Image (spheres, rainbow, N blue to C red):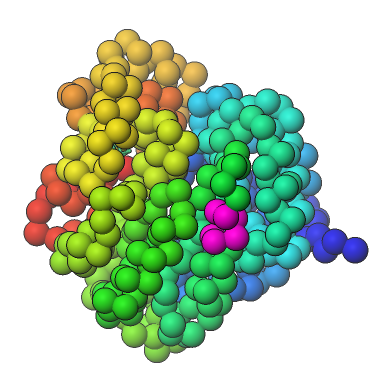
Amino acid sequence: MVPRVALLSKDQIDKLPRRAREVVEYRKSGLSLNHIQGCPLDCAYCIRHTYGLWDQRVPRALMSDAQAVEELVAHQYFQPHVTPVQVFNRATDPFLPAVRPHTLAVLEDLDERELTNHVLVITRHQMKPGDFERLNRLRHIKLTLLFTYSGIDNKDIEPYPSSVAAESLKLMSRPTRRRYRTVLYWRPLVPGLNDSPEHLDAAYQLAQHADATVFTGLFYRDEIAGYYKANGLPEPYEDTARRKIVPETLEQRVLATFDATTPLFRKTSCAVAYAHGLPDYNGHIGIPGLCDICPLSQLELCRTAHKVPTPDRFREVAAHLPEARGLVVVDITERAAVVSGLETEQPRYHLQHALGFQVHDVRHPHRERWHGRADIGWEGENEDD
Ligand code: SF4
């Protein structure tokens, strides 16, 4: 019998931390569906630390798959054919044996609705030969499988070996004619841990199998730093930061390892969009410093699609959002719109994806050359999202 995860009772759900109860949440790469939570893979840097879910090692469901998809498509931020969607990227791995039937059910449900949205599925788990047929049957959604690979061999930090993700990427990339796309999600890159020339070369070799590669650093929030300290793990940085961290010298070495025929990106949405032959849905083209490593044909695609929204268009998109009532458009340039009056980041992501244009919060200034990285290890200015 195919294993499935247990459904929590209402009482059990009520006891979960507040953010864990939010089954649909806007994150930077898309509207994220997380009705299954819990993971036994124990990556020390897991984002579950920040949701009060670290101790939840057994996946459990907060509702049925059908209910969850209903909640997603009825969500105020969801726009059919526009909003990028992510499935199970916050609190579990979508291809854990017990979770995979739910992942496939969600993807098939979205596809049966003939939605053409981007759908991102991030995994480090083992894919099976039969997965190709099942996933290749999806005709409408733009599915991207992102394989998390770090090459970290310290078992205290990453007990589940990166070699599994590497094999899954190869397996799922092998068929030449397929509808879904594959991305090598090379992360987290941590100085001293997985940045030796051998590590970089292994990632480059693996990138030859993928439709695109994206590299990012470590999301080193306070809760994750606390876990490192409490467990005596070697701390990669002295400070914690809102954004992911890739020091400048490491980035230069990464770029030097790759060649012009191996598509490499700094931003997840850029890699996903490129793999589908589409312009970036986050409008990163407004920040030219991000695009200097992008294939020329893709650059052209993004440039052609780049439209600076008018203030009226902005207000139109924001009009139906109660939490955007206080929205003030401080400035709109070729690069980005700067806004204030939004309490959380979620409506900002909604605006950004609906407009395909960078929307920055005035409280988090974006400066050149940092590419949305935290300011640890960088001497330039900062840009984001
Ligand atoms: S041109 Fe720039 S925005 Fe477009 S995919 Fe490339 S890096 Fe991203």
**Foreground pick, 327 / 89:** 89
Residue segment shown in magenta: 169-174
Residue at image point 73% right, 47% down: 134
Quarter of the render that holds ligand 1: top left
In the image, is 206 to the left or to the right of 130? Answer: left
Q: Is residue 51 visible?
A: no
**Foreground pick, 366 / 127:** 127
Q: Which quadrant would residue 197 be assigned to in this image?
A: bottom left
Q: Principal SS element in the magenta part?
A: helix
Residue at image point 18% right, 37% down: 288
Residue at image point 42% right, 18% down: 317
Residue at image point 37% right, 30% down: 279
**Foreground pick, 258 / 233:** 258
Place of residue 132 in the rendered image (x, y in percent of width and height, measured from the top left): 68, 51
Place of residue 160 in the rendered image (x, y in percent of width and height, measured from the top left): 56, 77
In the image, is 131 to the left or to the right of 145? Answer: right
Extreme bottom residue here? 232
**Foreground pick, 254 / 118:** 254
Q: Which quadrant would residue 69 be assigned to in this image?
A: top right
